[in-house]
Image: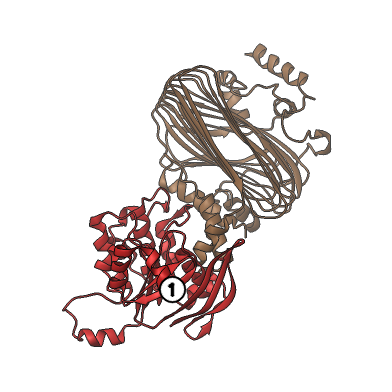
Chain colours: A red, B brown
Amino acid sequence: MLKIENLKVSLGDREVLKSVNLEIKPGEAHVLFGPNGSGKTSLLMTLMGFSNYRVTEGTINFKDRDITGMSIDERARLGIGMSFQRPPTIKGLKTRQMVALCSAGKEIRLEEMANRLNFEDFLDRDLNAGFSGGEIKRSELLQLMAQNPDLILLDEPESGVDLESISLIGEVINELLERKPGKDHAASSRERRSKRAKAGLLITHTGYILNYVDADVGHVLYDGVLSCHGNPRETLRCIQDMGYQECMRCMV
Amino acid sequence: MKGARENKLQRARDAAEKAAVFGEDLDLGQFIHEAPSHLNMKDLSSLSEPDKKELLTVGVDTDIKERSGSFMQIDHSVVHHDIFQDGLEVMSTSEAREKYDWLEDYYWRAVAVDTDKYTARAELHQEHGYFIRALPGVKTAFPLQACLFTARDGLAQEAHNIVIAEEGSELHIISGCASSHKVKAGLHIGVSEFYVKKGAKLSFTMIHNWAEEFAVRPRSATIVEEDGVFLSNYVCMKPVKTLQMYPTTFLSGANAVARYNTILVAVPGSFMDVGSRVYLKAPGARAEMIARTITTGGDVVNRGHIVGEVADAKGHLECHGLILSEKGLIYAVPELEGRVSGVELSHEAAVGKIAQEEIEYMMSRGMSESDATAAIVRGFLNVDIMGLPAELQREIDKTVNMQGIF
């Protein structure tokens, strides 16, 4: 679904991504670890197409199309969606209106979706105005529910979220990624796995979200270089035990 | 009374050449002063379709549906006034001045007759304007609409409006000013004096839709007594050559409240100098002013001035400006004047273009760049007016949306 080859990206004068190769297949969920400033958010912003992030080398392919030069809205309409860490406040635009805009004319059950996220009380507030960390996450997920993208980029979905809400956020992410666990399905879990089409790329610092979302592959991004592809839990344990320095060595 | 009137006329004559503090000094000689009189209308249905459309954009419903009263003046003729609720009065101010001796006390009390050549002109050449009054305790079921319309190209229209919300009353007025689609130039001088008595509430929503070559000089002021509330909304999103006004409110009674909301869009060729000023003169007085200005190529000066004269009074002013084109100017002048300790005044001002970050955020949800920009601008202009009845808020939203600046 997504294939990144030899990607180099600059933000202003600074090269923020030096070497990124990554492939995400339909139905897969990947996790991105890395210390602050390593380029994780830059990678997501580049995939979404934000103008500040300038691709200097390499290509991004999505659904077999080269999207390297594509505008943000074209990418969104092609099926990429992103949950932002610090989205801007849009004064006077009600959250309800934004969610409706995200649905792009599709019929959505807005109240039901908001209810799922305990977010009804925020629908008539200005988008992101004075939202706490956890409220921003729920607002972002609500917009993604309405948008229903095929590849979901999640920038630290658990940061600033209290322990009670984190399971809710985890459940909704699973739903978005068609990974809802449970026995009430007619199909076996193997069948469901094989039918699953949605893919995700998550940034996590703490790894908490892995308690709720069973990711398939973990990567470590260190100083703009993507490495150490492996089992996400093992990767997390390795980082916890040995620190990112160890990943540096693994690269060499 | 005669002496009082004569005194005002004399002061007006003395100020006939006095330039205004702000705005281009207009030569009043360049305008036509005579207009043919227009016939009375039973209702507004006989207006031409294009004129009806112009009126709709300023909140004047020519079907007069859901209105407690209606007033219409064309050029120098009051062609229509009607009321649909007991306890309300709507008529021409000249008629009211004849009818009520006591009205002389209200003439030029809030606004000084010798403020400048425009107020002087209104006294010396006044041709009507509206008198609207809610008797004590009367609450309007629907807003009243008042319309000042110019049909003669190049005409100077001078109107003097007086609005009185007697004790404990609640009065909502939509005042639409527009020119006929055939009119290109002209001058509108509108003097408005508002009196909000003890415990009364007055909301006044003024919407302007003039012509490219039009000059506009409203002169208005409000006196609010104890526990009174004055809400003023002003919307001007259509071309105008030169518009200058600085409405002022005196919060004279304890716990009096004033709120000004201003929405301005300056298109290329338009010059707008619009402010609002509140004097906090009694303990517990509260003032809030919110302005949203946009330039698509015109120039806007947005002023705000709060004067705190007593302790335990509060005021906040906010002016936000968006520059949507390479040309155009927004000049925000927020002024706070505290004259005693214990007064709380604050302001917030920001002028700039739409943040790229906001546009790209919206685009990441699938909107095109122009749709994203439009949604942000609509949001920017969407001012929730506290204390305004929902139907009036809807009316304003509708007007703002209808003006469509893209």
Look at label 1 and name its amino acid. Met
Residue at 74% in and 16% down = B10
**Viewer-proximal residue, A193 or B351?**
A193
Residue at 45% in and 23% down = B313
Horizontal and vertical percent for residue A210?
Answer: 28, 68
Compared to residue B167, the image places residue A40 above or below, namely: below
Residue at 73% in and 53% down = B182
Displayed quadrant of residue B241:
top right
Q: Dot 1 falls on which chain? A: A
In the rendered view, does B396 fall on the left or right side of A144?
Answer: right
Displayed quadrant of residue A109:
bottom left
Horizontal and vertical percent for residue B72?
Answer: 60, 42
Compared to residue B146, the image places residue A136 above or below, namely: below
Horizontal and vertical percent for residue A196?
Answer: 31, 83
Horizontal and vertical percent for residue A24?
Answer: 41, 80
Q: Is residue B276 visible?
A: yes
Residue found farthest to the top: B3
Name the secondary structure under disc 1.
helix
Displayed quadrant of residue B126:
top right
